[in-house]
């Protein structure tokens, strides 16, 4: 079996906006505090022809995409599923979480992992300060995100404000920093329900599209079902957003692989991110089919693993992050996937997916 490298290059039409158009703000504040200094919609004041800089935005600063090394593009340090109206930093001890989760990061660091993408969004336990402390201590780059999940983890004001206002808020977290931490989000994380999108989710996808146009940040969407993935790509197309900015999260949960093919054909990323021992055979079949179809340039691999469960004793049952690198990649290699292709799937592809140009 032989797979050839696809020479087609994704050419993102990434747009930009200067930081001075925003007031420093965070999602924890009053929505009305987020205002534009320029007085006009930011995507109307974008200049297309200015030079672009390629960067990855981590919780400890920006780095070159070439510095990311081996990447886990979808994992979690901590989550709190108590609900948007009850989630609070008062519910956990940061020192306990760091003590609990640090050994898992040390383990993957020793296996060669250099970058960890944390996909816990606001109102489910996102804490950029904990991530920054872990990053510095473990010696691993960590990315955090802006954006919202889905009900019941949406703040009540999500229904009241416009997509434009949500986009302004999320862009501020990328360009200025999250709340008063000064830590900047490195991508956009959203979520939709299975099946056709409901109105609130259409608003969130639209807001994510406009946030991308202001910042160049990738959009990782908890999606699962193919119908929802296609609807989201249609919204991006309507908003004139390059599909290469979109990551179809939890794609392996969709049994009809024709949707995976369509997403890849449209230029977006297909992410198989629930890889673990009990699902290894399923994922091997999915991956080989994608490779046989020529979609090696559209594929991301991760585990959706972790995490410290706020509210449970000692963080509850935690699944480590080592399986993919320690066991699964050697299985792929033994079945004929060459080292160069594995490098593409675990280093080159995710670095391209999360690179911002602005």
Image (cartoon, helix red, strand yellow):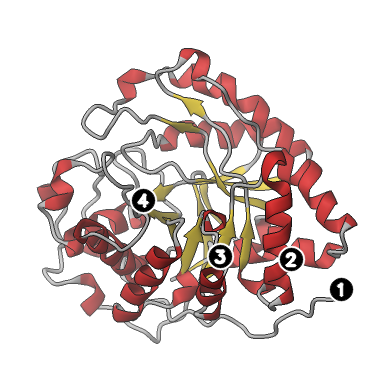
Say which residue label 4 marks: 146
Helix or strand or loop: what does disc 1 sit on?
loop
Image coordinates of residue 280 in percent, x first then y, are 72, 47
In space, the residues marked 1 and 4 are separated at their CA atoms by 41 Å
Give the quadrant of residue 156. Answer: top left
In space, the residues marked 3 and 4 are separated at their CA atoms by 20 Å
Which residue sits at x=68%, y=65%?
348
In space, the residues marked 2 and 1 are separated at their CA atoms by 10 Å
Q: Residues within 10 Å of mark 3 (few under 14, many from 20)?
A: many
Which residue sits at x=89%, y=55%?
334
Image coordinates of residue 66 in percent, x first then y, are 67, 63
Q: Is residue 65 above or below residue 115?
A: below
Sequence order check, earlier mark of 2 and 3: 3
In space, the residues marked 3 and 1 are separated at their CA atoms by 22 Å
Say which residue label 3 marks: 270
Which residue sits at x=72%, y=60%?
285
Q: Residues within 10 Å of mark 4 (few under 14, many from 20)?
A: many
Sequence order check, earlier mark of 2 and 1: 1
Helix or strand or loop: what does disc 2 sit on?
helix
Say which residue label 1 marks: 1
Say which residue label 2 marks: 288
Sequence order check, earlier mark of 1 and 4: 1
Q: Residues within 10 Å of mark 2 (few under 14, many from 20)?
A: some
Q: Is residue 85 above or below residue 274?
A: above
Quadrant showing the C terminus:
bottom left
Helix or strand or loop: what does disc 3 sit on?
strand
**Position of residue 46 in the picture relative to residue 15 (left or right):** left
Which residue sits at x=19%, y=62%?
163
């Amino acid at each position: 079996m032989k797979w050839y490298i696809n020479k087609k290059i994704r050419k993102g039409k990434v747009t930009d906006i200067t930081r001075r158009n925003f007031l420093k703000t965070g999602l924890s504040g009053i929505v009305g505090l987020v205002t534009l200094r320029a007085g006009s919609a930011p995507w109307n004041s974008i200049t297309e022809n200015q030079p672009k800089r390629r960067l990855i935005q981590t919780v400890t600063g920006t780095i070159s995409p070439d510095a990311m090394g081996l990447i886990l593009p979808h994992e979690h340090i901590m989550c709190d599923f108590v609900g948007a109206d009850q989630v609070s930093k008062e519910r956990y001890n940061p020192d306990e979480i760091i003590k609990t989760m640090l050994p898992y990061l040390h383990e993957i660091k020793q296996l060669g992992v250099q970058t960890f993408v944390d996909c816990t969004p606001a109102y489910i336990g996102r804490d950029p300060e904990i991530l920054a402390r872990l990053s510095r201590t473990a010696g691993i780059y960590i990315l955090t995100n802006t954006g919202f999940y889905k009900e019941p983890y949406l703040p009540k004001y999500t229904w009241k404000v416009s997509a434009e206002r949500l986009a302004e808020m999320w862009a501020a977290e990328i360009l200025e920093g999250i709340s008063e931490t000064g830590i900047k989000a490195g991508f956009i994380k959203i979520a939709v329900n299975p099946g056709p999108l409901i109105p609130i989710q259409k608003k969130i996808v639209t807001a994510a599209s406009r946030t991308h146009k202001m910042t160049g940040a990738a959009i990782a969407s908890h999606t699962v079902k193919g119908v929802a993935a296609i609807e989201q790509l249609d919204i991006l197309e309507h908003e004139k957003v390059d599909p290469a900015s979109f990551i179809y999260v939890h794609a392996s949960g969709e049994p009809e692989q024709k949707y995976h093919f369509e997403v890849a054909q449209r230029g977006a990323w297909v992410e198989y991110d629930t890889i673990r021992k009990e699902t290894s055979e399923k994922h091997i079949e999915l991956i080989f089919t994608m490779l046989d179809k020529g979609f090696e340039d559209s594929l991301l691999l991760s585990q959706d693993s972790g995490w410290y469960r706020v509210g449970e004793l000692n963080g509850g049952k935690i699944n480590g992050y080592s399986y993919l690198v320690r066991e699964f990649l050697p299985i792929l290699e033994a079945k004929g996937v060459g080292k160069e292709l594995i490098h593409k799937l675990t280093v080159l592809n995710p670095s391209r997916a999360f690179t911002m140009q602005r």
